[in-house]
Image (cartoon, grey):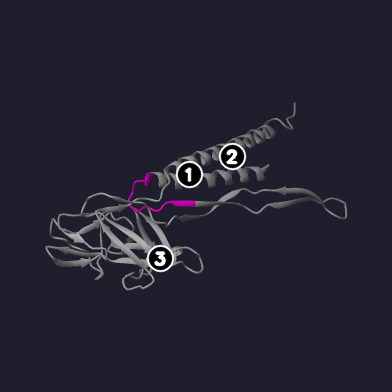
Amino acid sequence: MLRGLYTATAGMVAQQRRTEMLSNNIANANTAGYKADQASVRAFPEMLLKRIDNQPIPSTVGSINTGAYVQEINNKYNQGDIRETGLLSDVALVEQNVPIHPETNRKGFLLFAVENQAGEERYTRNGNFTLDENGTLLSSGNPVLSTAGQPIQILANDYQITEDGDIFAGGEFIAQIDVRFEDDVRNLVKEGNGLYRTADNTNIPTALGNGEVQYSLKQNYLEGSTVDIARSYTDMMTSYRSFEANQKVLQAYDKSMEKAANEIGRIG
């Protein structure tokens, strides 16, 4: 009976994690450049039950499942839809040629380099940039870095951003937006607020000058998220129903144990 309790509980925990992941995806469905998470749920190894008695060969009772768990959560790093916004500060990062990693068979990932509040280098795909009162180009409040490794400052109301990321105002060159390339997406870790860091705490190299990578920046455009909102709601309902089914199994076991403790073996 205790095995059944553990199995049902494991199923509930797995579906709770999956529901939290789907809720986060839905909440970020309209976040520029957001890459949706997807969970891989796997069953624990089954156990073979055998009865050991006076027989020379133990008789087989059957197999029993020991529950399920969320094995891993991966990002959908594919390109999001590109839409026009008409805002000067909006920049979409458009992939043209991104090499595939030989071990993972997955494409690498291009990102903007930014500086977080602690002065550390972080990365984002959110091109919904803004300018603060000092003219600093920001992504979700984090200064966008140039190829020189410095925050970009635009002291003009009218400016142009070329496909290479060069920024011009009044015909004068200001800075070039730095785009980084991570060839192994397993090294990327989500930090929240659309930011990524590397698992090994190293800086991602620039894509500038990398002959294997081709991309372009589109001013007045934004890249949408990779969240399939309809599919996410359907998956959430499925996950909720599975959680509910495991919960009912757990309640049934609880009632059986209560009855066994309070009624079986009672001395009249």
Task: Please state which of residues 36 and 158 is positioned toward the viewer in this rendering.
Answer: 158
* Residue at 73% across, 30% down: 266
Dot in front, 1 or 3: 3
Figure quadrant of residue 5: top right
Dot in front, 3 or 2: 3
Whether residue 4 is situated above or below residue 137 in the rendered picture = above
Q: Is residue 82 visible?
A: yes
Marks 1 and 3, how far apart in space?
32 Å
Q: Position of residue 207 (x, y in %)?
A: 34, 69
Please check the rendered image and state whether residue 31 is part of the magenta-colored stretch, yes or no.
yes
Q: Position of residue 254 (x, y in %)?
A: 62, 36
Q: Position of residue 247 (x, y in %)?
A: 57, 37
Task: Please state which of residues 129 and 241 is positioned toward the viewer in this rendering.
Answer: 129
Q: Quadrant of the C terminus?
A: top right
| Disc 3 residue type (three-letter) | Val
Q: Which mark is residue 98?
A: 3
Q: Quadrant of the N terminus?
A: top right
Q: Is residue 117 visible?
A: no
Q: Which residue is mark 2?
A: 246
Figure quadrant of residue 262: top right
| Disc 2 residue type (three-letter) | Asn
Task: Please state which of residues 176 and 64 is positioned toward the viewer in this rendering.
Answer: 176
Q: Which mark is residue 255?
A: none
Which structural element holds mark 3? Answer: loop
Marks 1 and 2, how far apart in space?
14 Å
| 60 relative position to 118: left or right | right
Q: Which residue is mark 1?
A: 19
10 Å neighbourhood of mark 1: few (<14), some, or many (≥20)?
many
* Residue at 41% across, 62% down: 188
Q: Earlier in the sequence, mark 3 or mark 2?
A: 3
Q: For the magenta stretch, what is the residue range?
A: 27-38
